[in-house]
Image (spheres, rainbow, N blue to C red):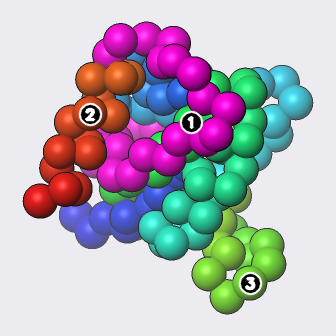
C-alpha cells in the first residue's frame, strides 16, 4: 500500500486531543472550521508552527509540527491548494470527511518539531511537557 507523508502544524490544545487518541487521529474541526488542511511539506508546517502557533493564546503559544502518513487512495480524494508561495501547498479535506480521513492514517501521528513562543509560561499538561523534552533530546543528537 502506497502512502503519502503529510504534516500538520498544531497548538497545545490540538496536540492534547491527538495524544488522547494515542496519536491515531486528529480531533473534529470546530464549527467555524470547515476545512482540515494538512500541508505537503515540513518546511511550510514549520513556518506556520513557528510564526502563527507561537503567537496564539488558544494554542498556549506553542507550535508543534506533526507528521503522518495517509493512504494514497485517500489523498487522491482531495484537492491540493496553493495558498501563497511555492511551498504553501495544503490538502483541503472538508470537515465532514475528517473521520474517514483519520481512518486512512497509517501508523501514528508523530511530533517532529516544537516551537515555543515568547508569551508561553507553562504547559497545560505534564504529558506535553515530557513530550517536548523527549523531542528536544532526539533532535539534539
Nearest-to-viewer mark from 1 and 3: 1
Give the magenta range: 101-127
Labelled disc at residue 51: none
Q: Which of the two residues, 31 or 72, is positioned nearer the viewer here? A: 31
Give the secondary structure at mark 3: loop
Residue 96: x, y in percent? 71, 34
How far apart are the alpha carbons under marks 1 and 3? 24 Å
Residue 43: x, y in percent? 51, 72
Q: Left or right: where does residue 127 sit relative to residue 37?
A: left
Q: Residue at x 64, y 39 (%)?
A: 118
Q: Is residue 34 magenta?
A: no
Name the residue that disc number 1 marks.
Answer: 62
Question: What is the quadrant of the C terminus in the image?
Answer: bottom left
**Residue 14: in sight, yes or no?**
no
Q: Earlier in the sequence, mark 3 or mark 2?
A: 3
Name the residue that disc number 2 marks.
Answer: 133
How far apart are the alpha carbons under marks 1 and 2? 13 Å
The extreme left residue here reads 141
The extreme right residue here reads 32
Labelled disc at residue 85: 3
The answer to whether 43 is drawn above or below residue 17 in the figure is: below
Q: Residue at x 33, y 52 (%)?
A: 112
Q: Is residue 104 magenta?
A: yes
Amino acid at each position: 500500500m502506497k502512502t503519502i507523508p503529510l504534516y500538520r502544524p498544531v497548538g497545545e490544545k490540538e496536540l492534547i486531543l491527538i495524544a488522547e487518541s494515542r496519536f491515531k487521529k486528529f480531533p473534529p474541526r470546530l464549527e467555524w472550521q470547515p476545512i482540515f488542511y494538512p500541508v505537503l511539506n515540513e518546511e511550510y508546517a514549520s513556518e506556520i508552527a513557528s510564526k502563527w502557533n507561537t503567537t496564539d493564546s488558544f494554542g498556549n503559544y506553542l507550535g508543534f509540527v506533526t507528521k503522518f502518513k495517509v493512504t494514497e487512495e485517500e489523498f487522491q480524494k482531495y484537492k491540493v491548494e496553493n495558498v501563497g508561495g511555492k511551498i504553501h501547498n495544503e490538502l483541503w479535506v472538508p470537515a465532514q470527511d475528517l473521520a474517514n480521513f483519520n481512518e486512512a492514517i497509517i501508523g501514528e501521528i508523530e511530533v517532529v518539531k516544537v516551537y515555543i513562543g515568547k508569551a508561553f509560561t507553562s504547559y497545560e499538561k505534564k504529558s506535553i511537557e515530557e513530550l517536548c523534552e523527549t523531542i528536544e533530546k532526539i533532535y539534539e543528537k
